[in-house]
Amino acid sequence: MTPAADAEDTSAELRVQQAAPAVNGPRRSPLAVSNWMHGDPSFLKVRELIEVLDPDLSVVDRKLLDAMLAHASDTVLSDAATGEAAPGTRVYSALATDVKRAMGWESHKSNSRILAAAKNLQSSVITIGYFAPGDNTLRHRNISLITLSEVPESHGVIYWRFSPEVEKLLSMKGERFLVQLKVLAKLTSGYSHRLYQLLCANTDRETLSWTVPAGDLRQVLNAAAESYDKWAAFERRVLKVAVDEINQHAAFNIRYELVLQERTKKRTHIRFIFEGPASALPPAETGPLLEEPTGQLVFDLPGATETSMPPPSAFAGKLGIRVRSRYREEFPGAPIDDLIDLWATWCVRHRIKAERPPRVFERWLNSLFGDLVLEAREGDASVWSTAFSRDLDQPVYRVMFALGGMVARQRQLWLALARSKYADKYPRTAMPAVSLDCVDFHLWVPLIKDEFMKANPV
């Protein structure tokens, strides 16, 4: 089988955008499988977007927006610092499976509800209240959320573009608060979703409490309807629902108590008391918080480093006599020394840090030359001459190497997308059996090269 190497762009608009650098690398995006399974898929959300009133957005709409913000937050800050892209011009992309996981929608095969949520975000206008410099009058700025969205029917990549005003808001200096996507994904109530984020943003880090006027709380929870005018209805249908669900899924517990007016005994305020490890509510951060440039112009390969690299000869010297002898036995007649020199030159050029050189070489050999490895194991050593005529700087080879460093679960997601794309391209033929092994990459990775590079930037 020889799959087509290039996938068609999704739209004329996106074709123009593909020339721009893509977004978050696999180790940065909290949506990435590796971060989701082994790390803490969280992101810093600006206070204004936590406290903004959005009565027309459902909990699904808000979850989709949070997934989009989480995926793009590092890149927005980087663009603001470097001027790499003007606000509102970058098209972001993420795997639909990653977005659905962040929303708690792993069991949903169809993306129809996400498509509807994207349309809602695209047509929604939110209001940010602020005081203009030198003016004590409260002003209201109305801004749209996203200006472009493209959602596949099931598997594939979701694309979106924020409005310039949203990106400017995300990149401005101000308070940001850690929001855990794993918690938001499990919350089913819109009241829980908003109260959790409000607690993260407003709980005093010294007293571990937040006192809010009862009327204001109804407003910020979008529970100002007449049906909640009576306290009993608001407490039963809104407050207790939100508190119970947060306590079930968050890393901390909260309880609340009523603050009564001394004379009339009227409920005036609600005090939330935080209970849990101090680390569950980290201090507020002021931004923009740039760790370092996000490497938009280089492929974010596992093991890449910004430190100085040794010359290729020193790099090749990390593979000793024992390793070379083993490969000579496995592939009789193969130019092992020349292949190691080729590997060393490639690693230095792409700044690959090889803490375990034999493993990195094995991954490189099997990923980039899987077809030759299979033929050479049949005893044909002459096939290796092809290795030295290949342009190893082509993106497909870098994608293969990156996939070789991922866990099986991540590879499985990309293989599923490749099968879907193959069915679209060749509807009358069945895709030949392929595996997740590196030696089979040449059979299916070209099908998903473009999508992989959009989700994992070059």
Image: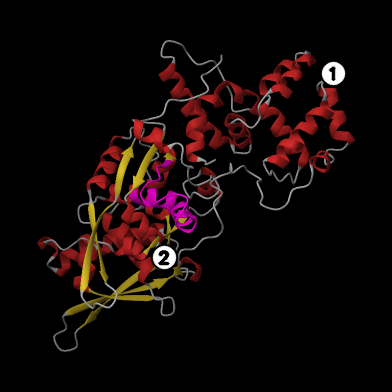
Image location of residue 167, percent across then percent down: 37, 55
Q: Is residue 110 above or below residue 20?
A: above
Image location of residue 251, percent across then percent down: 45, 62
Please state if 322 lies on the left or on the right of 228 as rendered.
right
Does 94 appear in magenta? no
Which amino acid, by three-letter code, is at mark 1?
A: Gly
Q: Quadrant of residue 233?
A: bottom left
Q: Quadrant of residue 127?
A: bottom left
User: Pointer 2: what residue?
Assistant: 176
Does 74 appear in magenta? yes
Residue 372 visible somewhere in the drawing = yes
In the rendered image, the residue lying farthest to the left is: 226
Closer to the camera, 190 or 415? 415
What residue is drawn where x is 43% and y is 25%? 8
User: Pointer 1: what residue?
Assistant: 333
Closer to the camera, 318 or 91? 91
Q: Secondary structure at mark 2?
A: strand
Range of magenta residues: 65-93
Query: Which corner quadrant holds the N terminus?
Result: top right
Which amino acid, by three-letter code, is at mark 2?
A: Arg
Counting other residues with Cα less than 10 Å from the Cα at mark 2, is it few (<14), some (14-19), or many (20 or more)?
A: many
Image location of residue 48, percent across then percent down: 32, 64
